[in-house]
Every structure is written in C-alpha cells, then in structure tokens.
Image: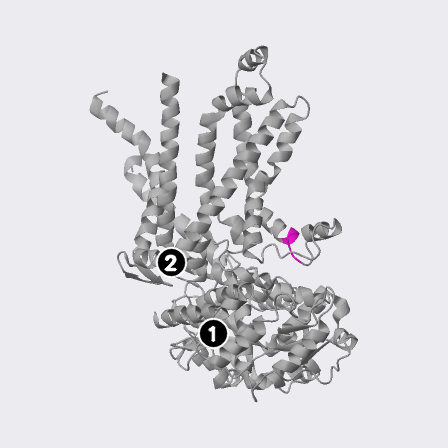
Amino acid sequence: MPFHVARPAVAALAAAVAMTFSALVAAQQPIVLQWQTANLTESQYEPIWKQTIAEFEAANPGIKVEPVLVARKDHWTKFVAASQARKAPCIVSVDLTTAAYNGYLMPLDKYWNAEPAEFRKAWSDAMLSSAKWKGQLYGLPIWGGTYAEIYNRDLVVKAGLDPAKPPKTFDEYLAWGRKLTGSDQWATAVLGGKTDTTTRVLLMWIWANGGEAFNADMSEATFAKNPKSLEAIKFYLGFAGKGGIAAPAPTTTNYLEQTNLYAQGKIATMRNAYWAVAKVVGDNPAMAGKSFVAAPPANVPNAPTLATVTASSISSSCANPDAAWKFIKFDAGRKWAVARAKVANWMPLRNDLADDPEIKADPMLLQYVQIGQNARSYPLPHPVWAEIAANDIVDAVQKALLAPDKTDEIFRDLDARLTKKLRDI
Amino acid sequence: MTPRRRRRAGLAFVAPAAAFLAAVIVFPLGHAFWTSLHRVRGLNATFVGLGNYVRIFGDDAFWHSLGVSFAFTASAVVLHLAIGLALALVVNELRVGRTALRILFLTPWMVAPAVGATIWLWLLEPQFGVVNYLLRVAGIIPSPVAWLGEPATAFASVVAVDVWRGVPFVMLLMLAGLQTIPVEQYEAAAIDGARAWTRFRYVTWPNLRYLVVVATTLDLINTIRHYDIIGVMTGGGPAGATEVLPVLIYNTAFRGNRLGEAAAIGVALLAIVLVLAIVYVRAARLDDDKAAR
C-alpha cells in the first residue's frame, strides 16, 4: 500500500492508541476531591481533619481528598468565585440556603434516601430541616456550636465577683462589666468586624431582650421597627467607646481578634461557642481550665441563644458526587464527631451521641448542650442571608459604633434596605 | 508579491496577536458588559437591559465609593509624585551608594501588594501592633490607636501604605528622567551663578515636565484600580470609609452575590480609566509633536 494511502489509516491508529493510553492513565488516576470549610485553618482542628483524610484515603485507595485552606473571612467569597467558574470544591460547608438558592449546591436526597435507616436515624428531622431548601436536602449536618458567655475565672475572682453567680440580666452584666474593666483591660469586646460573627452576637442581644430582627416569614427587617430590638442594640453597642466596658477598635474586631484578646487576658468575657475555648487554649496554653461558661444574660424568660449548624454539601460543579458523598458519610461518623467535640470543641449534631460516655465526660460541653436546648438555628433560612449578614448588618453596626447618636436613623435605614433585599428574590 | 497577497500575508502575521488580544482583552470586556445587562443570581441570569446601571447610579453607595476613590487616588498620586521626585533628586546627587539606595527604595515595590498589606495590618494592630507599641514607648500617644477602626485614620493608613508601595515606581521614572538631562545645561546654569532652587526651576523641571505628566497619568490609572491593599487591610471599612470602587465591585460581586451590578460598576470604572488613558495618549502625542518640531 502506498504511503500516501496508508497515512490516514496510520494516523487514525495512532490516535486510537493515544486515546486508549490516556484513558488507561486517567482510569489509574485517583479521584481528587477538594474539601473547603471555614474551620480547616483552625489549629485545634488540624490534627483531626488530617487523620480523617488519612484514614479515608486508606479505606478508599481510589480517592484523594485535598483540603482547601482559606482564611475564615474569605471562605464565602472564594466559594462564590469558584462556583461562578464552575470549579467549586466538591465538598463544602457554606451558608446553605443562599448557596442552594443560587444553584451552587447539589440536592442530596438521592444519596440520603439510599442510606440504611440505621444511618439516617442518627439525625433528627428538626436537624435535617436546617439543611433543606424548598423541601430538598442540600447538606448533612456535621457539627454545630451553641453561643454562650465565656468568662475568665481568674479575672472574675480578681474583680471580687463570684463565678458561681454569673449575671442573669442586662443590668447585672453591665455591673459585672464595670468591675471587670480596668487599666488596659476590658470586660468584653463588641464585635463589629466585617464577618457575620458580628451579626450572630447582635441577634443574640436582640433576642435576649425579647426583640426580633425580622418578622416571622423574613419578608421584613425590624431592627429599628421593634423597640425591644433597638433597645438591645443600643445597650450592646453602648459597651464600646469612651468610658465603656469593651476593648477599643470594635469595628475591626472579629472572632480572631476577640479570642486573641481573651487569650491574652485583655478581656474577661466573650460571647462565643465552645470552639473558642479550644482556640484560646491553643493560643495560650496557660488558659487551660481557667474559663467557665454561663447562659447569656437576658431580660426576658426563656430567651433563646444562637446555635450554628454546619452541614457538609456537594457543590453543583462536582464531577464526582458519589465519591464526595462517601467522604461526607465517613466524616459524619461517630468517631470523628466525638474527636471534633473532644479536641476541637465542635459540638456533634448526631442525636445518637448525646449519651456517649466521652461526650458526657466533658462538663463544659454538657453545659453548652444544656444552654443549647433553647437555641435558634443559624444561619437564618433566607436566600440573601449570606449577603446581608456579612455586609448590610455589619455596615450598620460599624456606622452606629462610629456615630452612636445616629443609631436610630442608621437602623431605620437598615430596615428599609434589608426589607427591599429580602423581597427581591 | 501582489498587493493583495501582501495584505493577506500581513493579516496572517497580525492574526495571532489579534486573536490573543481578543481572547484576553476584547472577550473579557465584552463578557463583563454583557453581564452588566443581566440580573445575576448565582448561576441564573435574567436580561434586565440597563436596569443595573439605573440601580447603581441611584444607589448612594456607588457615589460614596466614587468619592472615596477620587480622594484616595488624588492623595496617593500627589504623595507618590512629591516623595518620588524628592527621593529621585537625592539619589541622583549621590556619588556613592546610589545603586544600593535604589535597591533599598525599590524593596516595597518588589513585595507582593497583598503580602505588604498583611504585614502592615499586623504592624497597625491596635493591641499588639508594633506601631502603637513604638508610639507609646516614645510617649507620642497615651493609649492604643485603632488605626484601621476609625474612618479618618483608616483612610490615612491605607493611603500611607499605598504611598509606601507606590513611591518606588515614580522614583524610578524620575531618576531615569534626571539622568537624561544634559550636564551642560547644569554647567551653564552654574556659570550663570544659579543656586540649587534656580537650577531645579529652570533646568530640571522643564526637562522633567513631560515625564511628570506621563507618570501622573500612569499612576492615576494604576491607583484608581487598586484593590489589594485596601481589600486586605480594611475590606472597605469601617462603615465604607475606604470602600474605593474596586473594593465595592468585589464586595458587590462576591460578598453581595450580585454579579450584574458589580459588572455595571466595573464598566463605570472602565469609563473613568478610559478617560485617563485618552489624557495620557494625548500628552504622549503632544510631546512627540514637540520633539518632531
């Protein structure tokens, strides 16, 4: 056969060989799953997630898990940017309602329904409902955190206060705060930095005063409209400024700054979840055993606290959702839930762990569980929540901290702005 | 080769570069403009025509941010030029250690902006930062200052960090310009008994004037687009005091999840940069004309 006739056949054969070879190579390549959650960068959690990945990969040789380490404040924006590029990490823990509404997540009902009843019964219906949007499941609740008031026992005793009788009302808290404030030391920190932690704490003060930030169906904001809400906002933000009981620079204070201040003994109390205690001890081991926790002060009976629910989801751009679900299931196992609770202080959300001896052996965790029995789930279930929680509400807090005499006007503007956004979906 | 074939050959030579420019400039610009005509919610988009433009121009946040952008750019560029020119004059006069000094002054420019901003973020930290510590030890401030926590100090801080980073570029341009001035002009001025200020006014400045226009325009274009330093140090806060347009774009797109509006702000920013670019091109052309004459 002349060469010019055989040339197309040779080329086709070469292409076929190349394709077969590349398919074989691809088949031998492990599936790589990227995993992004806000807490992977926290040192107290690091040994656990490393061990989780190692054991998962050993049990599943064809799958590799690649952690995506992102600073907490950039967690959401990186996820959004990656989702827009259809390159989001496969396994993510993000504001579920907003992400699901925007099409960034994959419904998980197919996987969930295929699981045995034994596995599914570890999650209560109430817990699962926090991971649903429009009736579909978009995440598996993995860990959570109830917010409470954490006190530095040494500083409380030094101020002549009794750790056994922590403040129960706003006025009692302020009285304690005045005694806990001294030279280069403050009672607490007002959070005003540009993350949604600012919003979490603000909501708690509002609820503790019998106020509401939104109406029942979240179609209207009532920060200023509800007098109890506005009263609580003024009381809380009033801690800042000259003669106040809060550390300076509240507009730049976030979770990291707050825990740093507490770890260094600069502030005596902080409003936070149990994981903050682990972070403080990690930052300053001398703080081990020096904290005690109490329910947040409230002006109304049975005031709810706030409990975050963090669920693991699969992004809609994930090419290997089956493998991703496998990892989510593995990470949701009892062993890791207990390890997260014991070492990193992330509270388990499986209801079959409530009586686990290792969980019960931690008195502070038990206290947190008790405080969390009357808690509202966070993030709030609205498609624009991620946007307003870290932006509009924080901006209003910052403005009010900088111009306290304009607080009414600032929060009235916020109500109008938010109501417009809440309805614009 | 016939003229037609020659033209075709020319087009063939230009085609790869044209395709590359289309891919990296024309397509992204077109895509951004197209996005600005849509209401984008996550992965869903609806055509809204000029709705996003109406929305942003009716929003106080945009006008506030535009004002912050102008204030930031004007302050930073004036300081870049003044300090850059002063340093260039000093370095140009040196006979020993000029290269070492030049490298030293260039260091901030070599540091990645986000890295530099992070370093400054910690230096300016109110409780544990070195700046407050030194100022307190020196007795200049009685208590820690929240540099990034108050609007005025936050604005001054981001301008200062931008100046720290931007001065080397201007200094380098000016130094290059100073070295092209014929020595004979200074010698003639010296013979006429001109002092330092007179030499600067009648010899240095006229020779540098065109370079100053070019440096100013380039620096304006560069500075008005800055995101990294402010993004890292304040994220636009407190209460929007440092929210320049690029930061507003980022916050609207990725924090606010409103890509269409963010793209519309981006197009508005592009229009501003375009005007500055036209000024630059005209300035360059004027100088070419002068040189030709």
Classify residue A1 as left or right of residue A40: left
Identify which amino acid the numbered label 2 is placed on: Leu
Identify which amino acid the numbered label 1 is placed on: Gly
Depth check: give the residue in front, A344 or B3: A344
Labels 2 and 1 share a subunit: no
Decide whether the magenta segment is chiefly helix, strand or loop: loop
Residue A139's label in the rendered image is 1
What residue is at 41 percent from the left and 50 percent from the top?
B66
Range of residues picked out in magenta: B122-126
Q: Position of residue A368 (x, y in %)?
A: 63, 81
Inspect this view and state whether residue A21 appears. no
Q: Position of residue A306 (x, y in %)?
A: 55, 79
Secondary structure category for the residue under label 1 = loop
Residue position for label 2: B259
Seen in the picture, residue B259 relative to A148 is either above or below; the reply is above
For label 2, the crowd category at 10 Å Cα-Cα, with few meaning under 14, some 14 to 19 and many 20 or more, is many
Q: Position of residue B274 (x, y in %)?
A: 36, 40
What residue is at 61 percent from the left and 75 percent from the top?
A273
Tag nearer the camera, 2 or 1: 2
Let me know if residue A311 is in the magenta part: no
Q: Rounded to the nearest whole Å, what is the CA distance between mark 2 and mark 1?
A: 25 Å
Inspect this view and state whether residue A10 appears. yes
